Amino acid sequence: MIIFLSLISPIILFFLWASYPWDLGAKVVDGEIEEVKNPKAFEHPTTLSILTWNMAWGHGMGSEGTAEYVKNDKAFYEHHLEMMADAIKHSGADVVLLQEIDFGSSRSHYIDQLKFLAEKTGLSYQAKAESWRTNYVPFPYWPIARQFGKISNGGAILSRFPIIKNKIHLLAKPASKAWWYNMFYLYRYFQEVTFKVESREFTLINLHLEAFDKEAKMAQVKELVKLVKNSKIDFVAGDFNMLPEGAMKRSNFSNPADNYEGDHTYKQATLMGLKEVVDPTFYLQKEESWFTFPSVKPDRRLDYIFYNEKWPLISTEVVSGAHAPASDHLPLKAIFKFFDPEFIRD
């Protein structure tokens, strides 16, 4: 028995240390808000440009730890972040919603990617939603040298406008997974953020939904519908990990695990009462022009922006270009009317 305990004790101690802070249950917490530079004054901006981007922590393809994943040096991530910053600046976005951003992880050489992008883009206001924090993630499983190690990751907002509230809804982890697996697994989340521009306020939700468990994803969307209906939410955007209801291809992707047959989360999401920036009929006329994943040779749409129709939509586009290899998703951008003499009716 003594020999057995001496062998098993180091394993238990490593597990407890690696999985700290031992988070499992759903919860709502207040997130950080920060301004890093003196912002420019804005008087009655006529438009509001929103961009959502799953940035795959600047790794690009293989960021999930698949066969394509390789460890890269710090210069690699700095170069990809520079590409992202240039794309964001060129897009002219006022508010940027980011998913899968590292705040100080060993796999990306402890770069605070939110601060890096804030400084490079000039978007002064930041709101952080840490949804994955562990001392050590032993994945990919082998070889050990490829493992992610210490993780601090989640969602974030960069904004040209002041942020006055940042509330983070950490969602229940998949019940289908073992408890020890969920000790190391990320939270999916809703990041509920409120902005103030002069006399006007608007609230949006930045989210990243479950990718590998259909039941968990459907439960998350039902929770989202309830939140939007019970709150004053103007926009909901992010990586939904779902296909449009009319998508022509739902299975037989390069990764056999990517199967959306029987997945009706899009239909459930429409119950929020918000409109999607790409009309379903228009989407089907040229489906491939709206694909956001993978960034290289995209074959499906996973990223969305829903909006309250009191904000008139001006335009929508998937932002492609030289920045594509920096993530495994392409950004989606939409522009809305903001201050307009014919529109102000609050």
Image: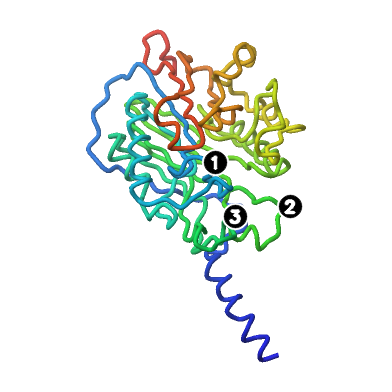
Q: Residue furthest right?
A: 262
Q: Quadrant of the N terminus?
A: bottom right
Mark 3 vs mark 1, CA separation in Å: 16 Å
Q: Nearer the viewer, residue 60 or 317?
A: 60
- Of tags 3 and 1, the one toward the viewer is 3
Does dot 1 land on a helix, a strand or a loop?
Answer: strand
Mark 3 vs mark 2, CA separation in Å: 12 Å
Q: Quadrant of the C terminus?
A: top left
Q: Amino acid at mark 2?
A: Ser
First in sequence, mark 3 or 1: give its number.
3
Mark 1 in CB contact with mark 2 (< 8 angstroms): no
Mark 3 in CB contact with mark 1 (< 8 angstroms): no
Per the rendering, the mark at residue 115 is none
Does dot 3 land on a helix, a strand or a loop?
Answer: loop
Per the rendering, the mark at residue 176 is 2
Name the residue at 31% across, 19% down: 44
**Mark count:** 3
User: How far across and down, in percent of the image, does residue 187 sit?
Assistant: 57, 50
User: Few, some or many C-alpha atoms within 10 Å of disc 3 (few <14, some 14-19, many ≥20)?
Assistant: many
Task: Tell me if residue 125 comes above or below residue 71 in the rendering.
Answer: above
First in sequence, mark 1 or 2: give its number.
2
Mark 1 vs mark 2, CA separation in Å: 21 Å
User: How far across and down, in percent of the image, does residue 286 sit?
Assistant: 59, 13
User: How far across and down, in percent of the image, does residue 184 sit?
Assistant: 58, 59
Q: Amino acid at mark 1?
A: Phe
Name the residue at 34% across, 24% down: 92
User: How far across and down, in percent of the image, does residue 230 sit?
Assistant: 60, 34
Per the rendering, the mark at residue 185 is 3
Q: Amino acid at mark 3?
A: Tyr
Check disc 1 and report the residue beneath it.
190
Does dot 2 land on a helix, a strand or a loop?
Answer: loop
